[in-house]
Amino acid sequence: MHAIEFETTSHQHTIRVPDSVPDGVLLKVVLLSEVPLAKPPVEHNLKALLASITEGMTAEDTERSQDFGREVTEWVS
């Protein structure tokens, strides 16, 4: 088994692999971090955000208003 140890900094959620690693090779990536890796907050979940919009609303709040359109204007001839 062969191993490579290198240090890098992620940029836009990508890590550059050393040039010595050939294309098409199956890799097992292990990430070690000295600081805890944060989980994405739940409130950034679009489905959960949309589901929470109607919390505390009543049927009257979501009722559609009656729309009768514009009044008919009578023009003087």
Image: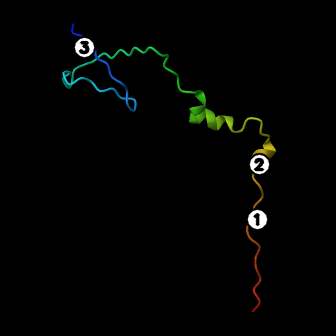
Residue 24, position in %: x, y?
Answer: 21, 24
Q: Are marks 3 and 1 in contact (CB under 8 Å)?
A: no
Between 19 and 27, the one lying in front of the other is 19
* Residue shown at the point (77%, 36%) measured from the top left: 56
Q: Report the amino acid beneath label 2.
A: Glu
Give the side of residue 5 with respect to residue 40, left or right.
left
View extreme (bottom): residue: 77
Q: Secondary structure at mark 1?
A: loop
* Residue shown at the point (74%, 70%) measured from the top left: 70
Q: Which residue is mark 1?
A: 68
Residue 66, position in %: x, y?
Answer: 78, 58
62 versus 10 height, above or below: below
Mark 2 surroundings within 10 Å by alpha-carbon count, few (fewer than 14), some (14 through 19), many (20 or more): few
- Circle nearer the N terminus (3, 1): 3
Give the side of residue 49 with respect to residue 12, left or right.
right
Mark 3 surroundings within 10 Å by alpha-carbon count, few (fewer than 14), some (14 through 19), many (20 or more): few
Q: Which residue is mark 3?
A: 4
* Residue shown at the point (33%, 22%) measured from the top left: 8
Q: Report the amino acid beneath label 1.
A: Phe
Between 68 and 23, the one lying in front of the other is 23
Q: Nearer the viewer, mark 3 or mark 1?
A: 3
Between 75 and 22, the one lying in front of the other is 22
- Circle nearer the N terminus (3, 2): 3
49 versus 1 height, above or below: below
Q: Nearer the viewer, mark 3 or mark 2?
A: 3
- Circle nearer the N terminus (2, 1): 2
Q: Are marks 2 and 1 in contact (CB under 8 Å)?
A: no
Q: Find the distance from the CA under tag 3 to the CA under tag 2.
A: 63 Å
Q: Report the amino acid beneath label 3.
A: Ile
Q: Which mark is residue 63?
A: 2
Give the side of residue 64 with respect to residue 51, left or right.
right
